[in-house]
Amino acid sequence: MASGSVIHKKNEYVVGGYTFHSKENAQAAKDELNAIKYVSAKTNGNDPKQVYILYNKLIDRKLFETPLGLAYLKELQQFLYISDMIPNEKIRPIPIKNETHFAIEQKRERIEHRSELHELSIQVARYKNNYMKLLIVNVVLFIAVIIMFLMLRTSSNPNIVNYEVNIQDKYAQWQEQLESQEESIKARQDELNQKK
């Protein structure tokens, strides 16, 4: 256990590794720490029978209320559970005052909220990651569609985009060829007519 001195910080009092927000609670913890040292010195901590007697006396007298004292009672209780000499059914539960119980419940709720926040932050990160992946895929697909339209537009092969233009160009070429052939035929006819 840590020393029995109270370390005072800004609106915080540290006793035995626990932080208290009031001077009264810190003093109560310091008193319990001194009591723990006293009873530990007077009791053989390796003898389950002595530990069992001490444990029951501490519970009957309701000496411990702070987290420090409750942690000490829990250590004694765990030692008794491990021991073969004391049946587990005879080991009494540790009574908790309402204020202490309320504080423990608040701490448990804060821990649960922290774990929920952690899970939510993981989900948010996962969603952001998926969003970025989908955004990249959409941009790549959009660029691919634009490239395909450009290729279709500039291609010489007829397709759905430039089909009408290509057909008009072909008809214009055929018309020019027909007109040039007509002119050459007329020129030959004129030559033949003049020779006659």
Image (cartoon, rainbow, N blue to C red):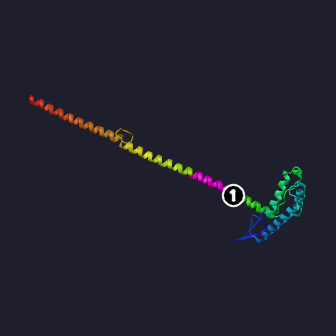
Q: Which residue is mark 1?
A: 113
Q: Is residue 57 above or below residue 133?
A: below
| Residue positioned 15% across, 33% down in the render | 187
Question: Extreme top residue here?
Answer: 196
Which quadrant of the structure image shows residue 60? bottom right
**Residue 52 horizontal/vertical position (percent):** 89, 56
Q: Within the magenta stretch, is there residue 9?
A: no
**Residue 97 horizontal/vertical position (percent):** 82, 63
Task: Tell me the amino acid under the disc marked 1.
Answer: His
| Residue positioned 44% across, 45% down in the render | 145
Q: Within the magenta stretch, is there residue 126?
A: yes
Determine whether, in the image, residue 44 is placed left or right of residue 112: right
Q: Residues within 10 Å of mark 1 (few under 14, many from 20)?
A: few
In this rendered view, identify the residue nearer to me: 51 or 109: 51
Q: What is the chief secondary structure element of the magenta stretch?
A: helix
Q: Is residue 81 above or below residue 11?
A: above
Which quadrant of the structure image shows residue 51? bottom right
**Count of numbered marks:** 1
Quadrant housing the C terminus = top left
Disc 1 element: helix
In this rendered view, identify the residue nearer to me: 4 or 177: 4
User: What is the span of residues highlighted in magenta in the rendered image?
Assistant: 111-128
**Residue 134 horizontal/vertical position (percent):** 53, 48
